[in-house]
Image: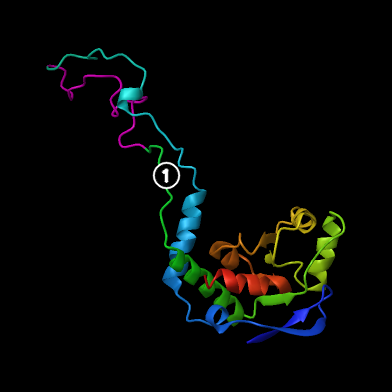
Amino acid sequence: MELAVLKHNGEETGRKVSLSDDIFAIEPNDHAIYLDVKQFLANQRQGTHKSKERAEIAGSTKKIKKQKGTGGARAGSIKSPLFRGGGRVFGPRPRNYSFKLNKKVKQLARKSALTYKVQDNSLTVLEDVNFDSIKTKNFVSLLSGLSLADKKTLFVLPEANKNVYLSSRNLPKAQVKTVNDVNTYDLLHADTLVLCEGSVSKLETLLTK
């Protein structure tokens, strides 16, 4: 499969880049995508939720009324979950939500996400981007040239570029990542995936290890 390489103004450069069928044209595995996205979202959770249980509530331990003769249920402590201000039963405790996922499953998920982008015609190959200075308007003009100003767009760079990254940071619908940092969630979340020309070979190498 071949795709034309575009200039920053959206015109074709005359060059074409070959995309590996082993990465961009596989049989997508939805379950692998589900597991990878689930792990990504689980890793974002802090897990610091906590409520006080009966033993942690500040209050008297004196028996609040006699055992018999009141006509009501027995009650031994004001800290009982049955009373207002008492401890919570089976409340949340701090925990770690992360879980292990095999490397091959994560690779399959990313390949499946890339395949979906190709099938939806949502993949663009762009000549390498480099700005002389940090200016948001430079990135805005780049998006306008590609007709992507109103779309959620993920740019994948072959390596870290501070000027490009900082120029895009104020734009809520644009995201810039390197090949090593891109994940399945980001691929699916974006309406359009823009691969810099130098990113294609690095991405293929990364997903075939």
User: Where is residue 13, by image quadrant?
Assistant: bottom right
Residue that carries the numbered disc 1 in the rendered image: 96
Residue at 31% from the left image edge and 24% from the top image edge: 55
| Amino acid type at mark 1 | Asn
User: Circle 1: is it few (<14), some (14-19), or many (20+) Cα within 10 Å?
Assistant: few
Identified at 21% across, 21% down, the residue is: 75
Left/right of residue 5 with respect to residue 184 in the rendered view: right
Q: Residue 181, position in %: x, y?
A: 61, 59
Q: Where is residue 3 in the image (x, y as percent from the top left)?
A: 69, 84
Give me the residue at 14% from left, 17% from top.
67
Magenta stretch, residue numbers: 69-91
Q: Among all residues in the image, which is located at the extreme right?
A: 132
- Expressed as whole percent of the image width and height from the top left, the position of residue 149 reads 77, 67
Q: Which quarter of the figure is the N terminus placed in?
A: bottom right
Q: Can residue 196 be seen in this view?
A: no
Percent position (x, y) of residue 17? Answer: 70, 82
- 36 magenta-colored: no
Question: How many numbered marks, from 0 up?
Answer: 1
Q: Which of the pair 90/140 is nearer the observer?
A: 140
Q: In this view, does 128 lie to the left or right of 187?
A: right
**Along the line of sight, the residue nearer the viewer: 195 or 20:** 20
